[in-house]
Amino acid sequence: MSQSLMVEALGGLAALFTTLCWLPQVVKVIRDRDTSSLSLTTFATLVTGLAFWLAYGVAIQSWPIIIANSLTLALNATILAVKLRYG
């Protein structure tokens, strides 16, 4: 396996794990509707940052960045929406 392919695989695995790590939190937040222990400022800032990462990925036409940040943005925007709705 070439070094370039290994680096891309490493990046892909990093993106997969850092994206999927939010799935249990989203399921819990939706199921329990309890976001009292979650910081609104943190999630608002995170969602904003992810939107910028997505825009960056689109600007440089990097599919790994676009896919990873689209999914992570969707998951965290869901958490933020539940936080805004249920406090």
Image (tube, rainbow, N blue to C red):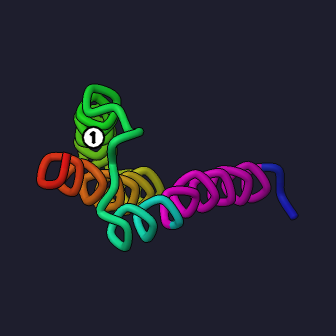
1 horizontally vs 81: left or right? right
- Direction from residue 85 to residue 4 in the image, left or right: right
> Magenta: predominant secondary structure element?
helix
Name the residue carrying label 1: 47
Task: Say which amino acid is labelled 1.
Answer: Val
Q: Quadrant of residue 72?
A: bottom left
* Rendered position, 36 above or below 61: above
Query: To which quarter of the image does residue 30 belong?
Result: bottom left
Pick the quarter of the image with the N terminus. Answer: bottom right
10 drawn magenta: yes
From which residue to which does the magenta span run?
4-23
Single out the residue that lies furthest toward the left.
85
Q: Nearer the viewer, residue 26 or 67?
A: 26
Give the residue displayed 48% in from the left and 59% down from the top.
25
Image height of 5 relative to 51, above or below: below
Picture coordinates of residue 16, whole percent (x, y) = 59, 62
Q: Is residue 79 magenta?
A: no
Which residue appears at 73% of the width and 53% of the height?
10
